[in-house]
Amino acid sequence: MAVTVSLVFLFGLVLFFLLRSKSLGYGAAFIAVMFGFYLASTGAAGPVNQLSTAVVDAVRNL
């Protein structure tokens, strides 16, 4: 749970700075957010969570 909240915060922060620097338009940001919500409701959500957990564990063990 803590890793998921941290990653959501991290991705939200990156998205905020991309919008602020005008590297990403509001339409593209909306599509990115909606893709995330729809991805979370598919069968791919489990493997994506496992992959992100494995990456966080690998970085922590460096």
Image (cartoon, rainbow, N blue to C red):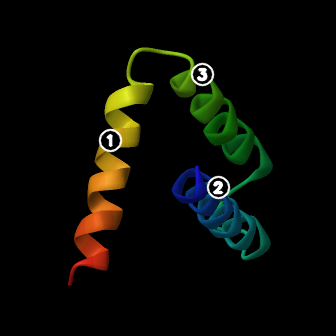
Residue 46 lies, in percent from the top left, at: 38, 28
Q: Could you say which is closer to the camera, residue 53 or residue 8?
A: 53
Compute the Cα span from label 1 to label 3.
17 Å
What amino acid does circle 3 point to?
A: Tyr
Residue ID for mark 1: 50
Closer to the N terminus: mark 2 or mark 3? Answer: 2
Please, is residue 58 above or below residue 34 in the view?
below
Residue ID for mark 2: 5
Helix, strand or loop at label 2? It is helix
Q: Which residue is painted at 60% across and 21% down in the image? A: 38
Which label was assigned to residue 38?
3
Helix, strand or loop at label 1? It is helix
Rate crowding at label 3 as few (under 14), some (14 to 19) or many (20 or more) other CA atoms within 10 Å.
few
Depth check, mark 2 against mark 3: the one in front is 2
What amino acid does circle 2 point to?
A: Val
Residue 50 lies, in percent from the top left, at: 32, 41
Q: Which residue is painted at 66% across and 35% down in the image? A: 31
Compute the Cα span from label 1 to label 2.
15 Å
Closer to the N terminus: mark 1 or mark 3? Answer: 3
Rate crowding at label 2 as few (under 14), some (14 to 19) or many (20 or more) other CA atoms within 10 Å.
few
Residue 42 lies, in percent from the top left, at: 48, 15
Rate crowding at label 1 as few (under 14), some (14 to 19) or many (20 or more) other CA atoms within 10 Å.
few
Helix, strand or loop at label 3? It is helix
Q: Which residue is painted at 69% across and 60% down in the image? A: 12
Pointers 1 and 2 in contact (C-beta within 8 Å): no
Closer to the N terminus: mark 1 or mark 2? Answer: 2
